[in-house]
Image (tube, grey):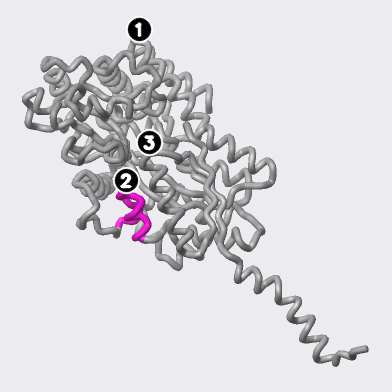
């Protein structure tokens, strides 16, 4: 029989106690993630991010849920209720605070501080990702939803050489395009988010102050104000210039006609650049410009994609969360991601002067800074930045019905929007 000394026994027991900690420290980073990004430029970007994660020694496990944000949220809710949340998931705006009350999130403060990330993020955007004052989510990219895309061939066809800067100029150009033989000068789609984007572009372009009061603060007086009615008047013009048969088709179904000059303008998010290029069209086929604004100052309707991090006990998932957080904040990763999707980086210190950036992205980045200085940055309703999902859905219902049903008057639309807000509070 072999006899062990007391010292040997202590050494053995100490080694055994340390083993789990060493295993945790050496765990190979693994990340389980869900998002709605599965195809096109969004799918290409998230796949590129996953490849970088793998290159850093991690195991990337992404489960896309195609479709509207609601479908992805349903899957997230099911996993949380089952006690098996993903290590991180796509989430944005006020939903970050709302969902952080449903399940415990990771406190990212130390990781964010080590990267100096908060210093290079717009204050209002940082606030959305810090429910309870603690970083729980990280913004990945920014889009302006009131970006104006103009077909170069469409502009030539209308014999026009000046881009519109106000709604009056926009309307004049649309009529010129109509007179030049374009049955539908506006190339937007007919999805719910498309309808919401068109309305928010109208209202913010007329008055960002009224937009903030009515849409972001849900002020009862502002909801019934003249600016909201004027926005519905402008929205009806847009819908009259669109293909009446677009129904619920996505805007991408019109891209070929847009580039060919059979349709002339499109109000869309910056992601349309990535979709156009991914479809094989050239950057020289179209012009990217700010959306119309009537007060002479730049207006930026902000939509930011982000990841929220959910608490997990597994050492490999915790290591994966740390690696993912570091990658999301990395200037090189934000550059790679935005150059694929057509967005602009969340980091305000990223240099967009080099190759790989379009003039449209450079202009959007400048406009964001100028809009921040002018206090004319507002949050997108159509993309769940201005309100939580339930309120957003109720308001978009009104906007979609108005776009599809031309018998509804602007006055009736104002009343219905006000009623929708009151019933959803």
Q: Which residue is mark 3?
A: 380
Is residue 10 shown above or below 270?
below
Discs 1, 3 touching: Cβ within 8 Å: no
Residue at 46%, 35% in the rendered image: 387
Q: Would you say 205 lies left or right of 328 here?
A: left
Q: Which of labels 2 and 3 is toward the front?
A: 2
Residue at 54%, 44% in the rendered image: 63
Q: Earlier in the sequence, mark 2 or mark 3?
A: 2
Asked if the stretch drawn in magenta spans residue 43, the answer is no
Disc 1 packing (10 Å; few <14; some 14–19; many ≥20): few
**Residue stretch rendered in magenta on the structure:** 331-348
Discs 2, 3 touching: Cβ within 8 Å: no
Is residue 64 shown above or below 425?
below
Q: Residue 108: x percent and y percent?
A: 52, 59
Q: Residue 255: x percent and y percent?
A: 27, 29
Q: Residue furthest right?
A: 1
Q: Residue 86: x percent and y percent?
A: 59, 48
Residue at 53%, 28% in the rendered image: 425
User: Which of the labelled discs sits on residue 407, or is there none?
Assistant: 1
């Amino acid at each position: 029989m072999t006899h062990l000394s007391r010292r040997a026994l202590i050494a053995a027991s100490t080694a055994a106690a340390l083993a789990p900690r060493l295993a945790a420290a050496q765990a190979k980073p693994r990340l389980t993630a869900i998002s709605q990004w599965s195809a096109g430029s969004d799918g290409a970007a998230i796949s590129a991010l996953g490849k970088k994660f793998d290159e850093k020694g991690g195991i990337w496990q992404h489960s896309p849920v195609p479709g509207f944000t609601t479908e992805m949220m349903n899957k997230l809710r099911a996993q949380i209720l089952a006690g098996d949340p993903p290590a991180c998931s796509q989430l944005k705006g006020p939903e970050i605070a709302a969902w952080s009350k449903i399940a415990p999130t990771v406190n990212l403060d130390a990781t964010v501080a080590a990267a100096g990330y908060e210093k290079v993020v717009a204050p209002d955007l940082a606030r959305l990702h810090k429910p309870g004052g603690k970083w729980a989510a990280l913004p990945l990219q920014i889009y302006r939803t009131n970006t104006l895309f103009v077909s170069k061939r469409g502009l030539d066809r209308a014999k026009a050489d000046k881009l519109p800067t106000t709604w009056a100029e926009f309307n004049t150009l649309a009529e010129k395009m109509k007179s030049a033989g374009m049955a539908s000068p506006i190339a937007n789609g007919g999805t719910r988010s498309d309808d919401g984007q068109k309305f928010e572009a109208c209202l913010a372009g007329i008055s960002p102050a009224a937009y903030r009061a009515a849409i972001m603060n849900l002020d009862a007086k502002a909801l019934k104000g003249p600016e909201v009615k004027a926005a519905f008047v402008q929205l009806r013009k847009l819908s009259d210039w669109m293909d009446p048969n677009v129904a619920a088709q996505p805007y991408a179904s019109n891209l070929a006609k847009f580039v060919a000059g059979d349709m002339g303008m499109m109000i869309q998010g910056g992601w349309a650049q990535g979709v156009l290029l991914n479809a094989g069209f050239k950057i020289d086929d179209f012009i990217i410009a700010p959306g119309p604004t009537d007060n002479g100052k730049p207006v930026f309707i902000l939509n930011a994609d982000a990841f929220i991090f959910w608490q997990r006990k597994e050492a490999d998932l915790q290591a994966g969360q740390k690696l993912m957080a570091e990658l999301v904040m990395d200037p090189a990763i934000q550059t790679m991601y935005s150059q694929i999707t057509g967005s602009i980086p969340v980091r305000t210190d990223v240099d967009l002067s080099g190759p790989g950036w379009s003039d449209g992205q450079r202009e959007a980045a400048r406009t964001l800074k100028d809009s921040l200085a002018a206090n004319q940055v507002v949050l997108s309703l159509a993309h769940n930045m201005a309100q939580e999902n339930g309120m957003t859905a109720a308001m978009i219902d009104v906007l979609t019905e108005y776009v599809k049903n031309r018998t509804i008057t602007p006055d009736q639309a104002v009343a219905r929007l006000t009623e929708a807000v009151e019933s959803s509070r």
